[in-house]
Image (cartoon, helix red, strand yellow):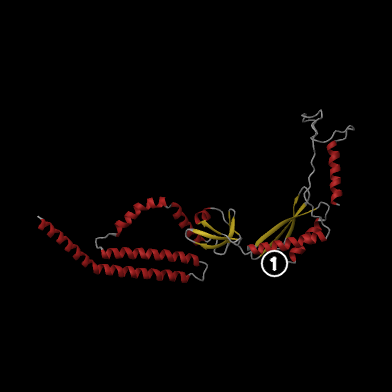
Amino acid sequence: MDNISVSTATDKLEGMIQGAIALIPNLLIGVIVLAIFWLIARLVRKFIKRATRRSDASNVGSVLGRLAQGILIVLGFLLAAVIVFPNFNPADVLASLGIGGVAIGFAFKDILQNFLAGILILLTEPFKLDDQIVYNDIEGTVEHIQTRATIIRTYDGRKVVLPNGELFTNSVMVNTGYDKRRLEYDFGIGYGDDIAQAKEIILNVLSNNDDVLSEPSPEALVVDLAGSTINIRARWWIHPPRRADVVASMDWVLEKICIDLVAAGIDLPFPTQQILFHDQTEETDGDRSRQREGWPAKNNGENPKAFNLSRSVIRAAQTTE
């Protein structure tokens, strides 16, 4: 009985060894095929990157190159498996992946969403490398667009990693999307000042700046009659519209306009308010038809509100003069 068991085990071991020896040629061929596909995949990736290196689609080429390399390596692995194991059926593996893909999709939903969003951002190019964008309270320069996230460098030198899914599904302001950008600032002058003269001074300052574009031409528009000032809005265009250019232009224009307005004798008043205190001791308190809301009573029948309003206007005019 023991001799039979030993003989059976020996026969099985010999069969396994012979089977392994028989697989060696197929294994070598499979390894060679896999190596060939791996080499082709690397060449394809380098070719795609080189073809798009000098174009605006260089980042897209890098991603497409990696995808092409991965697909070719997977195909080479399946072909090598068929060569090494003739009974291997790739269709069964693909079917298993299809069933498990649903569970994988739910488990890695956010990762897949960011991956697909990254591919769409690279293809549609709502913004590119070196563009300056604003997303919520984050503003900076686009340094890298990866398949999962976009890398932003803020103006104060910090690194921000933004998931591509958020950037693709939400509003993003691209400050460098066009080659021109309009800047504006409101200057408040006194009610007693000459509006036409103030406009002329503002336009002269903007016209004498080489960084301000002549077309579209600068503008000076009255936009508000505020409580203490007449607000004139200066509007001008610059090129290029990068953050450093915006800061430099605003600094020069605001300083020069302020100096010239003051030199011309035009007032730049600060906000003022008049506060009335109601003593709440009069007989008319609570009577909405007779209550004067803090205005003092007059015995001569004069309208207290009109009287005090006229005095306030006179004082305000005298102050501005």
Q: Residue furthest right?
A: 300
Pointer 1: residues within 10 angstroms few (<14), some, or many (20+)? some
Q: Is residue 202 visible?
A: no
Tag 1's secondary structure? loop
> Where in the figure is residue 224, as x and y percent of width and height?
74, 51
Which picture quadrant has residue 40? bottom left
Residue 265 in which image quadrant: bottom right
Question: Relative to 319, is 121 on the left or the right?
Answer: left
Classify 311 as above or below 175: above
Q: How many marks?
A: 1
Residue 87 at x, y percent in the picture: 24, 60
The image shows residue 306, relative to residue 46, as above or below, that is: above
User: What residue do we see at 80% from left, 59% from top?
Assistant: 261
Residue at image location 80% in from the left, 37% down from the top? 277
Residue designated by label 1 = 211
Q: Position of residue 156 (x, y in %)?
A: 61, 60
**Of all residues shown, which one is farthest toward the front?**
2
Asked if residue 252 can be seen in this view, the reply is yes
The picture quadrant where one finds residue 201 is bottom right
Q: Nearer the viewer, residue 180 or 283?
A: 283
Indicate the amino acid at tag 1.
Asp
Q: Residue at x 47, y 71 (%)?
A: 51
Query: Residue 6 at what x, y percent from top left?
Result: 13, 59
Instruction: Specify the quadrant that holds the N terminus.
Output: bottom left
